[in-house]
Image: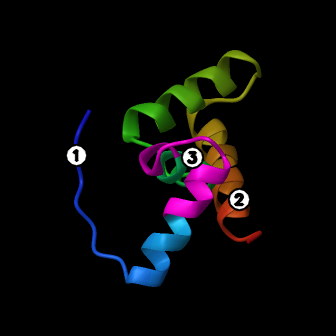
Amino acid sequence: MSRLTITLSEPRYRALKEAAAQRHKTIGQLIDESLDFYGIKSREQAQDLVRRARERSQLNEDQALAIALEAQHDVRHTL
């Protein structure tokens, strides 16, 4: 697993630390879940999503990719 250093304001850091504690999670777990929520995926994860969608449908690769991208767009813009 890779490590990352970020700079946050003190109030933001305290809020993040408190939110993680309230959920019985580490700050890293909370950030990882947030990235999932926003649809941030590696290329491999996105390709796997498209592959699984194609297996369950009669769509070709371009059609499946278009649906996956639309779904990702919708998730990012509903917040």
Q: How is the image coloured?
A: rainbow
**In-front residue for pair 62/4:** 4
Mark 3 residue crowding within 10 angstroms, few (<14) / some (14–19) / many (20+): few
| 1 or 2: tag closer to the N-terminus | 1
**In-front residue for pair 59/40:** 40
Q: Which residue is mark 1?
A: 3
Q: Callout 1, which amino acid? A: Arg
Task: Kindly state the secondary structure of the residue where label 2 is placed.
Answer: helix
Task: Kindly state the secondary structure of the residue where label 3 is placed.
Answer: helix
Marks 3 and 2 sit apart, C-alpha to C-alpha, by 14 Å
Residue at left offset 46%, top offset 51% = 27
| 61 with respect to 47 (left or right) | right
Percent from the top left, x then y, of residue 60? 63, 29
Foreground: disc 3 or disc 2: 3
Mark 1 residue crowding within 10 angstroms, few (<14) / some (14–19) / many (20+): few
Q: Which residues are magenta?
A: 17-29
| 1 or 3: tag closer to the N-terminus | 1
**In-front residue for pair 30/14:** 14
Q: Which residue is mark 3?
A: 33
| Main secondary-structure element of the magenta-colored stretch | helix
Mark 2 residue crowding within 10 angstroms, few (<14) / some (14–19) / many (20+): few
Task: Kindly state the secondary structure of the residue where label 1 is placed.
Answer: loop
Marks 1 and 3 sit apart, C-alpha to C-alpha, by 16 Å
| Image quadrant containing the C terminus | bottom right
**In-front residue for pair 48/59:** 48
Q: Which residue is mark 2?
A: 75
